[in-house]
Amino acid sequence: AWRFVKGCSTIVSPVAVGDDVYACTADGIAKLVRKGTTDEVDVVWSQAKLTPSSTSPVLHDGAIYTINRAGVLVAANSADGEVRWQYELPAGEYAQQVERIQPVELPGHGPAWMIAAPDGSIIWLDPQGQLIDQFRYAQPLTGLSLTNTPEGAILLVSTPDRLTAWEFGEG
């Protein structure tokens, strides 16, 4: 067993892949690697721009993503912590716990990021952080999912009052 003692001012979950652990610290997100079989760890990098608000980081395809305290979605290289891109989200407060950052396969666009924004908007970004589309739902989101079908996709949106499904195709 090993222990890393450095405080974090928010409640987020660490992410582990193999021997690498990405954890919140007072200085942002840090990449930790265990020193062999000892109880010591090395800090490989720490990135202040990744300091999360209350969003646990997502690790996907060699990058780490989080929504920082300024309300900006930040993507960084998971190997060295270098910021790849940033996207400013609409202002607001998350009223409900909802999965905020999700990798999806968007019909007609391919790989994308689906973001539950704090103002109830749903935002889709391409892998480089460029806006594909957005949907101003204007209600607190309690759940969000996109599932692909042979004809396109189904977007499932949950609010405190209802669950709504939209079908859309390639175009």
Image (spheres, rainbow, N blue to C red):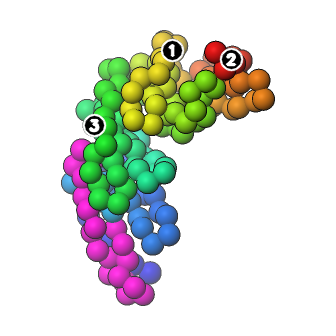
Which percent across, then down, holds residue 11? 38, 48
- Dot placed on the residue nearer the N-terminal end, 3 or 2: 3
- Residue 116 visible, this angle: no
Residue under the image location 35 percent in, 42 percent down: 75
Q: Residue at x 40, y 49 (%)?
A: 64
In this view, which residue lies farthest toward the bottom?
A: 37
Across the whole image, how many numbered discs are drawn on residues?
Answer: 3
Judge left or right: residue 40 versus residue 152.
Answer: left
The residue at the point 68 percent across, 17 percent down is 168
Residue bearing mark 3: 69
State how far apart marks 3 and 2 are (Cα). Answer: 33 Å
Q: Which residue is mark 1?
A: 135
Q: Name the side, left or right, on which 64 lies relative to 137.
A: left
Residue type of the residue flagged with mark 2: Phe
Kind of element beneath mark 3? loop
Residues at circles 3 and 2 in contact by the CB criterion of under 8 Å: no
- Label 1: element kind: strand
Q: Nearer the viewer, mark 3 or mark 1?
A: 1
Q: Which badge, 3 or 1, is on the more N-terminal residue? A: 3
Residue closer to the observer: 109 or 76: 109
29, 112: nearer the viewer: 112
> Do tag 3 and tag 1 residues touch (Cβ < 8 Å)?
no
Q: Amino acid at mark 1?
A: Phe
Q: CA distance from mark 2 to mark 1?
A: 13 Å
Q: Amino acid at mark 3?
A: Arg
Report the span colored magenta: 32-54
Q: Position of residue 92 (x, y in %)?
A: 35, 21
In-image side of 89 versus 106 (left or right): left
Query: Quick one: quadrant of the C terminus?
Result: top right
Q: Which residue is mark 2?
A: 168
Residue 51 lies in the magenta-colored region: yes
